[in-house]
Image (tube, grey):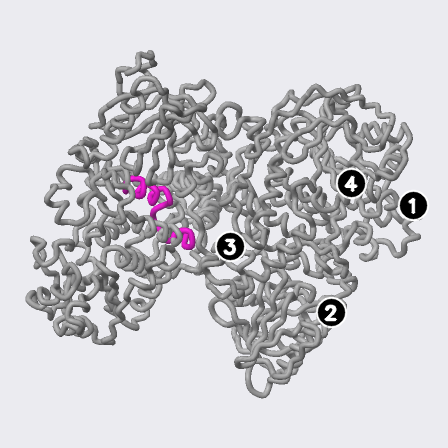
Amino acid sequence: MASASKSKYNSHPLENESINMVSQDGVSQDLSENVPHLPGERGITDKEVIYICPFNGPIKGRVYITNYRLYLRSLEMDSALILDVPLGVISRIEKMGGATSRGENSYGLDITCKDLRNLRFALKQEGHSRRDMFEILTKHAFPLAHNLPLFAFENEEKFNVDGWTVYNPVEEYRRQGLPNHHWRITFINKFYELCDTYPAVLVVPYRASDDDLRRVATFRSRNRIPVLSWIHPENKMVIMRCSQPLVGMSGKKNKDDERYLDVIRETNRQTSKLTIFDARPSVNAVANKLVLTGAIQVADKVSSGKSSVLVHCSDGWDRTAQLTSLAMLMLDSFYRSIEGFEILVQKEWISFGHKFASRIGHGDKNYADADRSPIFLQFIDCVWQMSKQFPTAFEFNEHFLITILDHLYSCRFGTFLFNCELARERQKLTERTVSVWSLINSNKDKFKNPFYTKEINRVLYPVASMRHLELWVNYYIRWNPRIKQQSVSHPLSHGLLLLSFRQPNPLEQRYMELLALHDDYIKRLEELQVANSTKLCDPSTSPSSPSEMMPHVQTHF
Amino acid sequence: MWWGGRGQSFNVAPHKEEPEMGLSGPKSDPGNRMPEPSSPQLGSCLASGCLPGEQILAWAPGWRKGQGLELPGALICTNFRVTFQPCGWQRNQDTHLNSDYDFALINIGRLEAVSGLSKVQLLRPGSQLKFIPEEILLHGRDFRLLRVRFEAGGLAPQAFQVTMAIVQAKAQSSQAQQYRGINLSKVGKVPASRKPPIPLLETLEDWETERKKQGAKGWRVSTVNERFDVATSLSGYFWVPSRILDSEVRRAFAHFHQGRGPRLSWHHPGGSDLLRCGGFYVASDPNKEEISAVESMLQAGHSDVVLVDTTDEMPSLADIHLAHLRLRTLCLPDSSVAEDKWLSALEGTRWLDYVRSCLRKASDISVLVTSRVRSVILQEHGDRDFNGLLSSLVQLLLAPEARTLFGFQSLVQREWVAAGHPFLTRLGETGASEEAPVFPLFLDCAWQLLQQFPAQFQFSEFFLLALHDSIRVPDTLTFLRNTPWERGKKSGQFNSYTQVYTPEDSQALAGSSGNLHLSVWDWDLRYSKEQISQFLNPGYNPEHCPDSWFPGQQTSFMAPGPPSSVLLFSRGALTPMNQLCPWQDSPSLLAVSSHWLPRAARSSESLADQEWGLPSHWGACPLPPGLLLPGYLGPQIRFWKRCYLRGRPEVQMGSSALTISGLQDELSLLQELLRKWAPRISPEDHCKKRDPNSILSQTR
């Protein structure tokens, strides 16, 4: 992370132990310098390089490579630049320049990152410094090709909260009021035999037997049958998800599949309508606007009680996940809380088999793989757009979303690894890795939106017009130090500019200040009240009775 | 949104109190929201809200369409404006001159009448209304939209009449000179002795007070232009170096375009002075003494002088006009721009580009002012557009005082109104070809700063919108005149030009009647208390006190001798100049042999980068206190949706009130309780670092 800062502010509270590394090139170094490291993180090598900063030009620095990160510290007196790059974000490493290269800094490595950073290091041509660095980086950035584990399996971090317990499907369905007279929870997929990319626990119409489900599965791509994602608490309209029907095989519709859809229709007494939302042609363009528009249509159908909706795309794990999860976010305020959002991601994305491993390419060196696609990023972008349009509706702040995206790539946590629940269970992921929700939930205050006002049952309809969508500058352009807002009011801003750590938004800061003052006032009033009530012999001496005063004190802040 | 959205405050139950103007006949029941079109009293009832000299030309009952519910009421056309008066709402004491639904005739940019599927634009030459409209749409040049659906049935002729009345009134209103402003005594609301909320800078005292406030010790108020005979477009008073005599000022100013010689705009507490002046009048032939006077006025006692051409790397007036027209077309509700072409269409207007130029230039100038003690002279040929824009922006960036609600209004009054920005011409009301929305461009820049530094401004976006919408409101003369002289003349401050020459008259007039006139800053005449309370930014949390300037650095004013460096700031770089004045072979006293060479400027580097090595070495050299350095790179310049997209149909489903203002209200309440209960406990006992009362008073 490109940042210009004074080193004394750089120690991360969780990562402040230093690694004492033996210098490889014999240059003496100050061992008291802190190179942050996580429990389980091992130093591999360090090297002096020239970092070619795209904004400030070449800077001499020392790079430290561990099994988790690439860390660079400037060696120049007047620059306090720090780069902190988890190896997981690296998508491509290339050599630049050859033996015959002329010109300054034309020989070295060019590293492309999944989080839109581009790092260039110039190295000396003598010796094998570039070859060594290239091989070490390649080996640890793409461990799958070298039979090495992803760092998540070596990470020994401990948190006081276990993020793996956040999502329990049965509990979540119970929260939605399921099972009920029309819907049942089935364990038919307990051993992933019905569908190997679906979760073990599914909700299906009460009247559909397990045999019906098996027959329908043969007609749906990868056996991803229509199952329930969400049910409206009042009008009982539902959001269903599935993959595309295999029409091409026989050329005609499948009787079992049609009967199954009829059963779904009949679960609702008010209206038997079921809108089938085919996300293949209309939403395939890469634009957050189209995704939002689609999700608004789904949410509107369900919320207005017009009809239930069945969403599918080709396989039901990319566009479908975007649409169902965004529609659920619009409809159900529970998902706008921190834990609710974690459950939403865990449910609609992770458990229903969004192919994170293929779409992100964790630890894999094939950067040009056609399977890679920023589907999940697009979803988070839409969530951010919503949070901009409804600044008080979400319990989490921007930093929460950015943290999720950072660890989508970092491979520090197990949360986003692998393609489906079956693979995760085989790998015993919950036992062998830490969940990113452990990190977030053990320090929730950092991720809270101070302006959050809890509102139950409010449906959010964002404006999906391009006129109202914004570029997420704080995510997409955050590495450009010139874009960073000058934070005048921040106490640290006189000394440094921190890019790797979040500067509090001045409004949030102000709010926190007032909130502290508020708590202080309440405390003083309560103390006064206690003092008064003990010596309350003559009521006429007090300006008003405590009962008159206290209603004011009982506030929603 | 916490600013409530325009008009929402009137959707609540109307005031129960009897309005003061109680001679309007029987009142309709405030709870009855249905119009009573048949009532003969309605006309007189409506008239009660009229301004002096205002006549109702036609009216028709209808429903205002907009965000949320339709609102019943009446559409009224007068010789001043078109207004929609909701049922049951009285022009009460709170806001008896204006409502959210007022459209000054000159603000109407487009008028459309709709019937079934046919839609006619009525303000085009030769266009005629051949049907009875079901609905009309008024598009404001301030990006607002008034959309009224008429009542069907036997009342249709009224709809026709009011529509035609608007067309005719609009046609006749092109001579904006008819707007005389409202005389306070006529309105009868305010005692004549009332002081204007913001010093209008029409008196010597106002200028002297402001000079002292800025701590501009080496400067004095010159009265040389009291009769507007040195420069007709300048205010009667301005600041010049103390040691320059008025006779010298008079002679020196003659060598500048339209007599607009160098004057102090703002004195930086660190010692620098920001000056502004018009272009040198090259054809004139000044003598040695005159050149000397000009030079010492520009030098202002500093040994370091920088001349800034404020039109360099800036859009032309025509550019700004065109960009604004394109922006308005783009933001029309029926704009045909396809969704996926929106961003390129927005870019195509070049409006954001021009906003960027302004911020960049202002940022560079603030670096010049703060990086060393010097005289920075803003020079523009006319000295009435970009000088004012940049001088104001620089002060917003440098002076915490200018970021307060009071300070910002004073700034606009000083750098725009008193300095003779030709508002009327720039609004396109004089028929001259020099229309250019320079002031709206400035407001957009101010909004950008507010976005970038949300805790540094005491005023809110709502305030900027209110100011934006006040530009064409005919109630006051603040914006509908080109010069202070015209403003004074037309307001009756001077009955005739000749009278100005009588010293007694000018004395008497300057002292009293000038203040009688309303200015745009009399917000309480047009906005309700509730709306005015939204002018304040609840997040305001200034870190820098105005008096925290680096003490001791102030150099003694009037350093003797010629300047040691005279530089021209142009194309983002400083170049040495041989002489300040352009007159050939002028016997300049400033024999400058500058050995101070400009640093090689990399085009990507801003002046701040060069000066402080920003941002790579941000920590190395802290910025001068109070300085805000705005970002102006691509995505940092944003589109002011809440202003420009107001007419569009998409409903921005706002959030509930921003919790921060609610919290503040509650804090005041708690404080009150605490005071009641524990009068002896002083706040310091509990909050040593910060007095809680002062935290609140910063925004209250």
Magenta stretch: dominant secondary structure: helix
Residues at badges 4 and 2 in contact (C-beta under 8 Å)?
A: no
Q: Which residue is mark 3?
A: B344
Mark closer to the chain start, 2 or 1: 2
Residue type, numbered disc 3:
Ser
> Which class describes the residues within 10 Å of circle 4: few (<14), some (14-19), or many (20+)?
many
In the rendered structure, which segment of residues is drawn in magenta? A387-408
Callout 1: SS:
helix
Identify the mark at residue B105; answer none if there is no mark: none
C-alpha span from label 4 to label 2: 40 Å
Can residue A474 be seen here? The reply is: yes
Q: Nearer the viewer, residue B172 or A311?
A: A311
**Residue A502: where, in percent of width, then height?**
39, 36
**Residue B584: where, in percent of width, then height?**
85, 31
Callout 3: SS:
helix
Callout 2: SS:
loop
Callout 4: SS:
loop
Q: Say above or below: A434 vs A15.
A: below
Q: Which residue is mark 4?
A: B278
Q: Say above or below: A479 vs B483.
A: above
Residues at badges 3 and 4 in contact (C-beta under 8 Å)?
A: no
Can residue A535 be seen here? The reply is: no
Q: Which residue is mark 1?
A: B503
C-alpha span from label 1 to label 3: 59 Å
Chain letter of the residue beneath label 3 in the structure image: B
